[in-house]
Image (cartoon, rainbow, N blue to C red):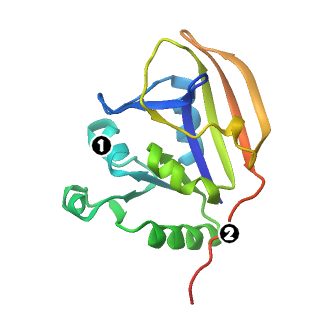
């Protein structure tokens, strides 16, 4: 199954700030949810997303895959699988999914955009906050007719925020064809 997972600002769907190369939020219950979902699975990200991880290192307990340009290949840690071509990665993603592995798309904005038509589900943590400013965005699924809410945990309170955990289902997922 191909799954998107992100924490977004509710009003804007911002996920990060390119100036600071950081996520919008570091909320413990969201991070715990992310870890539980992605643990022992495959995570796919872009080069900048990798660099935004603690110390720019791969996530422990997961197969880390990075889509990046050829000039970034030499900068990647050995524990990372990398692809330079989206179509090649898409085919391998389908193969992994056919083998019964869950593949999580974890960012950044461009990677989410490219994979969105192929995602089966998307887990979104919506944070109700209008103070932080971001400039990297997840597509607004509330306005995308291809997606519908299939599960929601509303009004979770943390020390600083109120948030919703929402699962969206892709009603018109595009199947990935594997060339022979």
Q: Is residue 100 above or below residue 125?
A: below
Q: Could one spot residue 105 in this view of the protein?
A: no
Regarding mark 1 in the picture, which secondary structure is present there?
helix
Regarding mark 2 in the picture, which secondary structure is present there?
loop
Q: Residues within 10 Å of mark 1 (few under 14, many from 20)?
A: some
| Mark 2 / mark 1, whichever is N-terminal | 1
Q: Residue 60, how many percent across, how many down?
A: 40, 47
Image quarter hosting the N terminus: bottom right
**Side of 75 where 121 appears, left or right:** right
Q: Is residue 61 above or below residue 166?
A: below
Q: Which mark is residue 175?
A: 2
**Side of 160 where 84 appears, left or right:** left
Give the camera-side residue of 132 and 78: 132
Q: Could one spot residue 91 in this view of the protein?
A: yes
Give the camera-side residue of 140 and 73: 140
Q: Residue 68, how many percent across, how many down?
A: 33, 58
Give the camera-side residue of 140 and 163: 140
| Residue labelled with disc 1 | 51
**Side of 18 where 142 appears, left or right:** right
Rounded to the nearest angstrom, the CA distance separating label 2 from label 1 is 30 Å
Residue at the limit of the structure toward the bottom, as seen here = 180
Q: Residue 161, how many percent across, how many down?
A: 58, 13
* Location of residue 88 by image quarter: bottom left
Q: Residue at x 68, y 64 (%)?
A: 174
Q: Is residue 115 above or below residue 85?
A: above
* Location of residue 165 by image quarter: top right
Q: Residue 67, how many percent across, how many down?
A: 38, 59
Q: Residue at x 30, y 46 (%)?
A: 57
Q: Residue at x 60, y 22 (%)?
A: 11
**Side of 135 where 75 appears, left or right:** left
């Amino acid at each position: 199954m191909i799954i998107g997972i992100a924490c977004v600002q509710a009003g804007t769907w911002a996920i990060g700030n390119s100036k600071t190369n950081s996520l919008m939020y570091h909320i413990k219950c969201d991070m715990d949810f992310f870890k539980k979902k992605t643990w022992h699975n495959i995570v796919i990200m872009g080069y900048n997303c990798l660099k935004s991880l603690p110390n720019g290192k791969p996530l422990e307990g997961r197969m880390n895959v990075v889509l990046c340009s050829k000039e970034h290949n030499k900068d990647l840690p050995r524990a990372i699988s990398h692809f330079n071509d989206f179509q090649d990665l898409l085919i391998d993603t389908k193969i992994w999914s056919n083998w019964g592995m869950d593949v999580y798309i974890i960012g950044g904005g461009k990677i989410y955009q490219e994979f969105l038509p192929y995602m089966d589900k998307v887990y979104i943590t919506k944070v109700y906050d209008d103070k932080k400013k971001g400039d990297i965005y997840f597509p607004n699924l509330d306005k995308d007719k291809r997606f519908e809410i299939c599960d929601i945990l509303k009004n979770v309170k943390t020390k600083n925020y109120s948030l919703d955990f929402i699962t969206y289902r892709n009603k018109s997922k595009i199947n990935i064809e594997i060339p022979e």
